Amino acid sequence: MSRENVELLRRWLWAFENDTAAFRGLLHPEIEWFPFEENRTPVHGVADAVRNRNEWLATWDEHRFDLEEVIEQRDSVIALIHITARGKTSGAKVDVRFHAQFKVRDGRVVYIFDHPNRAAALQAAALQE
């Protein structure tokens, strides 16, 4: 994994929160995404990934993503992502951390799997503590 892929991940997180066109442009046409909030039901293709993003954003009045840790090796980047948010309708506050495994192909994100913890993410990426 290269420094460029870590920077791509940072741009992807920014675009997720801020810019639909930039978000779309960072997705590989064959994107597979297994988001934790959807019980890891797979999302396939750019159109579905953008729809999933837009639906997620529509749920929250306020939200913030913080990238707390990055582990890179071989074809995966594991990112500890901290999300804080407040629901639009309920006002409920959310404070959650999860480890997302990213893979990049042709300079775009092609795979994302949201793992519940660091050990699961490292095992899936065949990395060790």
Image: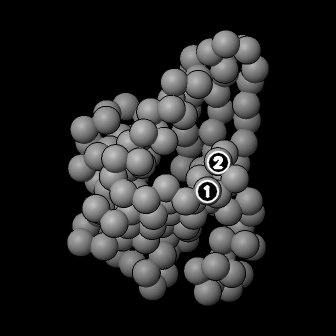
Q: Considering only vertical position in the picture, is 60 above or below 76?
A: above
Q: Residue at x 43, y 81 (%)?
A: 75
Where residue 14 sits, quadrant-wise, is top left
Residue 119 percent across, percent down from the top left? 75, 73
Q: Which residue is mark 2?
A: 38
Question: Relative to 63, is 11 on the left or the right?
Answer: left
Residue 15 percent across, percent down from the top left? 35, 40
Which element carries disc 1, helix, strand or loop? loop
Question: Relative to 127, is 10 on the left or the right?
Answer: left
Give neighbour class at mark 1: few <14, some 14-19, many 20+ (Cα, 10 Å): few
Q: Identify which amino acid the numbered label 1 is placed on.
A: Thr
Contact flag, marks 1 and 2 (Cβ < 8 Å): yes
Which element carries disc 2, helix, strand or loop? helix
Residue 63 percent across, percent down from the top left? 57, 27
Q: Considering only vertical position in the picture, is 94 above or below 5?
A: above
Question: Relative to 90, is 88 on the left or the right?
Answer: left
Q: Residue at x 37, y 31 (%)?
A: 18
Q: Residue at x 29, y 46 (%)?
A: 24
- Please indicate, yes or no, whether residue 11 appears anywhere in the rendered image: no
Spatial separation of the CA atoms under disc 1 and disc 2:
6 Å
Residue 21 percent across, percent down from the top left? 25, 38
Q: Considering only vertical position in the picture, is 3 above or below 47?
A: below
Q: Residue at x 38, y 42 (%)?
A: 50
Where residue 108 sits, quadrant-wise, is bottom left
Q: Which residue is mark 1?
A: 41
Q: Identify which amino acid the numbered label 2 is placed on.
A: Glu
Q: Considering only vertical position in the picture, is 97 above or below 109?
A: above
- Please indicate, yes or no, whether residue 18 appears anywhere in the rendered image: yes
Residue toward you, 104 or 118 = 104
Residue toward you, 69 or 51 = 51
Q: Quadrant of the C terminus?
A: bottom right
